[in-house]
């Protein structure tokens, strides 16, 4: 039964704080995962997002929309990943100022290796805490929030 003394504004703030603190706790634990000794978590996130591109290529600015780093930081990270032979870039054919990015074969292989270990680590961390029904609820709620924000709501 909801507490009538808790206002909708307070409830929203409490829910946000809980979501944020939970993510911080989970991310701190995952950063210690041995999978990320080969590649930093942020660099892996770039490879992961590139692996989800339907054509294999995406614009730098589109990739930046999926990451929580600034455009200049992403540009430097792209340079490092390109130097490591994990991603490739080319000019966009319709816009000479635009940059397209894609995984190399080595980048795709490393993303799959780290990704498989990462998913196991997430399951080992969250699996004992949430049953299947709760995991479905979490997925439903977080997907609803993300869709709403991507659609321009609130």
Image: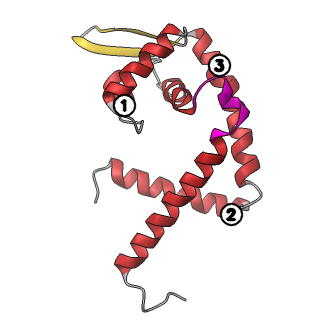
> How is the rendered protein coloured?
secondary structure
Considering only order in the chain, which callout, 3 or 1, is on the residue closer to the N terminus? Answer: 1
- Residue linked to disc 1: 64
**Relative to 63, is 18 above or below?**
below
Residue 144 within the magenta-colored segment of the rendering:
no
Residue 85 place in picture, x, y as percent: 54, 8
Residues rendered magenta in the picture: 31-40
Looking at the image, how many numbered discs can be counted on the residues?
Answer: 3
The reply, left or right, for residue 117 in relation to residue 95 is: right
- Residue linked to disc 3: 110
Considering only order in the chain, which callout, 2 or 3, is on the residue closer to the N terminus? Answer: 3
Mark 3 or 2: in front is 3
Foreground of the two, 123 or 84:
84
Q: CA distance from mark 1 to mark 3?
A: 21 Å
Q: Secondary structure at mark 1?
A: helix
**Relative to 65, is 142 above or below?**
below
Instruction: Examine the rendering and report whether any part of residue 38 can be seen.
Output: yes
Residue 138 place in picture, x, y as percent: 58, 59
**Relative to 7, is 69 above or below?**
above
Labels 3 & 2 near each other (Cβ < 8 A)? no
Residue 35 within the magenta-colored segment of the rendering:
yes
Residue 103 place in picture, x, y as percent: 52, 15
Q: Quadrant of the N terminus?
A: bottom right
Considering only order in the chain, which callout, 1 or 2, is on the residue closer to the N terminus? Answer: 1
Foreground of the two, 70 or 89:
70
Q: Residue placed at 39% from the left, 28% from the top? A: 63
- Quarter of the view holding residue 153: bottom left
Residue 151 place in picture, x, y as percent: 31, 49
Extreme bottom residue here? Answer: 4
- Residue linked to disc 2: 133
């Amino acid at each position: 039964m909801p507490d009538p003394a808790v206002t909708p504004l307070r409830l929203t703030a409490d829910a946000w704080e809980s979501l944020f603190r939970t993510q911080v706790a989970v991310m701190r634990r995952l950063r210690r995962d041995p999978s990320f000794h080969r590649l930093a978590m942020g660099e892996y996130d770039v490879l992961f997002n590139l692996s989800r591109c339907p054509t294999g290529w995406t614009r730098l600015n589109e990739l930046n929309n999926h990451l929580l780093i600034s455009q200049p930081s992403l540009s430097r990270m792209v340079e490092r990943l390109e130097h490591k032979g994990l991603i490739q870039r080319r000019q966009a054919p319709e816009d000479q100022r635009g940059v397209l990015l894609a995984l190399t074969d080595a980048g795709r292989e490393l993303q799959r290796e780290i990704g498989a270990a990462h998913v196991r680590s997430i399951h080992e961390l969250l699996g004992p805490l949430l049953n299947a029904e709760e995991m479905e609820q979490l997925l439903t709620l977080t997907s609803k929030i993300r869709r709403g924000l991507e659609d321009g709501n609130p």
